[in-house]
Amino acid sequence: MGGKVLVPLMLAGLVSTTRADEKIPVLHAGSETYSNVTVTSVSATDVYFTFAGGLANVKLKKLSPDWQQHFHFDPAKAKAAEINQAANQTRYHDQLIHQPAAPAPDMTRNQPAAVSPAVWREDFSGAMKQAQSENKLVLLDFTGSDWCPWCIKFDHDVLSTERFAAYACSKLELVKVDFPRRTPLSADQTLANVVLAKHFLVDGYPTYVLLNADGRELGRQVGYLNGGPDAFLSELDGFSKR
């Protein structure tokens, strides 16, 4: 995959969709109880779902034996996936620790006027209408903004830069499709994000999907891309020519 690095969710193994959309009135996981559950996906280690309180996932090993059998829980596969996740998390932290420090800015040069940060919206339909009226493309950012390490790093290294902001201002409508764990979202926004993730077959973060103004997918990047904003913008330019 070149310079791309997938977050542990993707590296844990392909996510099964055999029980997607299954509805469960009440699901018990250890001391936690979830009501009005709708399963979105099942991995070797977790079941992911929406429920009356929003979006959640629980470890299959915390479920009762009946539910473990229901979701085809395999302890050996789950253990292997957890070891893989831990190894990737360790590699990520090592990369952060050992990455070279950024050089100090040269204050002797005239500084250009600051570019306003890129503006991300949450309403997909509004972004599509705006893109059609201004002849722009639409970039979807499927992210776990407050827990996914590679999402946070890519946001810092690329999406928060003036280089990206200047490019987006002239060419893109930006939509953040967020799946946070600590930041609350409204029930309507949570549902809308789940629907978008299902529609575009997204099961790992970060995933960036570029669309034309008619909603046709031009290309996607799954995971972190090395090279900073220039590499990402070059990739988007390549997608836009399709």
Image (cartoon, rainbow, N blue to C red):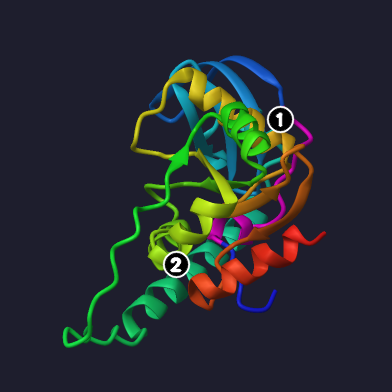
Label the magenta part by its dominant secondary structure: loop
Residue 225 position within the rendered picture, expressed as x and y whole percent measured from the top left: 57, 70
Q: Quadrant of the C terminus?
A: bottom right
Residue beneath the point at 64% across and 59% down: 222
Question: Which amino acid type is shown beneath numbered disc 2?
Answer: Arg
* Rendered view: 9 above or below 86: above
Q: Which mark is residue 129?
A: none
Q: Give the SS element for disc 1.
A: helix
Closer mark to the observer between disc 2 and disc 1: 2
Using the rendered image of the protein, determine whether residue 5 is visible from the camera's viewpoint: no
* Rendered view: 176 above or below 108: above
In the displayed structure image, the side of residue 46 where residue 15 appears, left or right: right
In the displayed structure image, the side of residue 239 where residue 39 appears, left or right: left
Would you say residue 11 sits in the magenta stretch? yes
Residue wearing tag 1: 70
Q: Which mark is residue 163?
A: 2
Which is more toward the observer, 104 or 3? Answer: 104
Q: Quadrant of the N terminus?
A: bottom right
Q: Residues within 10 Å of mark 1 (few under 14, many from 20)?
A: few
Q: Residue furthest left?
A: 107
Residue 46 position within the rendered picture, expressed as x and y whole percent measured from the top left: 58, 42
* Rendered view: 43 above or below 1: above
The stretch in magenta equals 7-20
Residue beneath the point at 73% across and 67% down: 238
Which is more toward the observer, 105 or 114? Answer: 114
| Gap between marks 2 and 1 measured at Cα | 49 Å
Residue 153 falls in image quadrant: bottom left
Using the rendered image of the protein, determine whether residue 84 is visible from the camera's viewpoint: yes
Residue 146 position within the rendered picture, expressed as x and y whole percent measured from the top left: 37, 47
